[in-house]
Amino acid sequence: MQIPTDIERPAVTPGGISPAERAMREDLAALYRAVHRYGMTDLIYNHITARVPDEPEHILINPYGLLYQEVCASCLYKISLDGEVRYKPDDGYTLNPAAYVIHTAVHKARHDAVCVLHVHTRASTAVSAMTCGLLPISQQAALFHGRIGYHDFTGPEVTLAQQEGLVADLGAHNVVLLRNHGVLLCAHTIAEAFFNLYWFESACKVQVDAMAAGSLVQFDDAALQATRDAFARVPIRGEREWKAVRRDLDRTAPDYRD
């Protein structure tokens, strides 16, 4: 199997998509815009994918060359997990090889993962380079404590041979810190993906600032468990926050739906 780079446009067009796919395209495009809005992008790099509803072997992914604030519903590519391109617009772009390697591997291994998100934010990359990893020193960090995988850096994830190790280190976790690289997140919904990324990034920022300031105070076990239990009682993780973010985008950047 080859990593697709130069892609010819296939016959499938957006006019043939289902209402469910259209809704997922809009939700995913909104997530790209939100990641930009909250300062978690890396120019044209990084990638977010979503599984196509009722088509579990197909995912939506961004073109390699667009800024996140340029992504809209109709520009997202649709590819199979084996690399067949089912739809792309005439945009002159291709797929990022790292995006293909990472996301097809995770979606194949984790059938529960509707959304897979990879970023190189400054704070998450800083924490990924710390031998201690993420510490339980904030409410945000408590949400993820003991629920993170760690994957050692072997260079950019651009070869198929790197997929096995990545998937093994992810395991059943929804977060894996890519050492010296960034973070990879899995979620059951787009809303949960935003929730996980926003609060994970917040936890990393707090840790970087606190470590720069000096000595740290960590939770005791009782406080840690109480915090985790409180988060666990949220019925649909991220739903309220995501509705608010979508309302903001509808007011200020409604072209994400195009």
Image (cartoon, grey):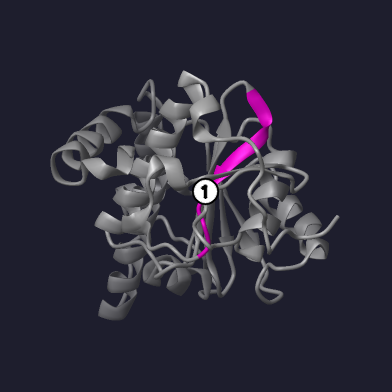
Q: For the point 67% across and 56% down, which residue is it?
A: 100
Q: Residue at x 37, y 23 (%)?
A: 233
Left or right relative to 134: residue 223: left
The image shows residue 211 at horizontal and vertical percentages of 34, 75
Q: Residue furthest left?
A: 251
Mark 1 is surrounded, within 10 Å at the Cα level, by few (under 14), some (14 to 19) or many (20 or more) other residues, namely: some
Q: Nearer the viewer, residue 12 or 80?
A: 12
Residue 201 showing in the rendered view: yes
Query: Residue at 44% of width from left, 60% of height from top?
Result: 135
**Residue 137 seen in render:** no
Query: For this rendering, which residue is in front, 100 or 245?
Result: 100
Please state, as top left, top right, bottom left or bottom right, where the C terminus lies in the image. top left
The answer to whether residue 166 is left or right of residue 256 is: right
**Residue at x 77%, y 67% (from the top left corner):** 159
> Residue 152: where, in percent of width, then height?
68, 69
Q: Is residue 186 above or below residue 204?
A: above
Q: Amino acid at mark 1?
A: Pro
Where's residue 74, x and y in %? 43, 41
- Nearest the viewer among 126 and 231 is 126
- In magenta stretch: residue 255: no
In this view, 25 is above or below 142:
above
| Residue pointed to by mark 1 | 89
Q: Main secondary structure of the magenta part?
A: strand
The picture places residue 243, in percent across and down from the top left corner, at 25, 30
Under circle 1, the secondary element is: loop
What segment is highlighted magenta in the picture?
55-64
